[in-house]
Image (spheres, rainbow, N blue to C red):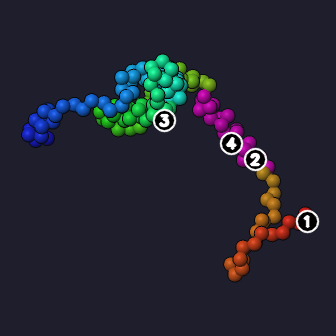
Amino acid sequence: MDTDLKKILAELPIKPPRSRLEPYREFIEELRSRGRTYRDIAEILAEKCALQVTASGVHDFVRTRTRAKDSLAGRGTKSNPLPVSNPVAAETSPASASSEEVQRKIAALKARNTGEPGPPVFEYDPDRPLRLRRSTRE
């Protein structure tokens, strides 16, 4: 970048944050790391901090800050803004099932009898309008 442009950037003051949630950023991050939902956080802020905010407002705040961190770090990829501190153990997740068990379940699903298809609901004739068939129960 040109030295004149760098000088201009150095002279510009840093804009203060526009969000009223900014003073509570670390608090919100800690609540998210403890597994609190955005709705829970909004309720806690209303009760304990006398700050009226919606759950979607908290979500937007966290999402915006996460994007800013990602772009500053040069990652530029989307990720979960704040991970839950107690992730589910890998042994209990469905992804940990053995490949043999998965193959057995797939084979069972393929072998499952889906039944014979019923009579068509309509008949198609390109020269006539589409009409529903009359029920044979009547």
Residue at the disc numbered 1: 138
Query: Which residue is farthest bottom?
Result: 127
At label 3, the amino acid type is Ser
Residue at the disc numbered 2: 111
Q: Tell which of 76 and 64 is nearer to you.
A: 64
Residue at the disc numbered 4: 106
Mark 4, secondary structure of its residue? helix
Residue drawn at the location 81% of the way across and 57% of the way down? 116
Seen in the image, is 63 located left or right of residue 2?
A: right
At label 2, the amino acid type is Ala
Q: Mark 4, residues whose alpha carbon is within 10 Å: few (<14), some, or many (≥20)?
A: few
Q: Tell us which disc is closer to us: 2 or 3.
A: 3
Mark 3, secondary structure of its residue? helix
Residue at the disc numbered 3: 56
Determine contact: label 3, label 1, CB under 8 Å.
Answer: no
Q: Position of residue 27 (x, y in %)?
A: 42, 20
Q: Tell us which disc is closer to us: 3 or 4.
A: 3
Q: Which residues are magenta?
A: 93-113
Alpha-carbon distance for marks 2 and 4? 9 Å
Q: Earlier in the sequence, mark 3 or mark 1?
A: 3
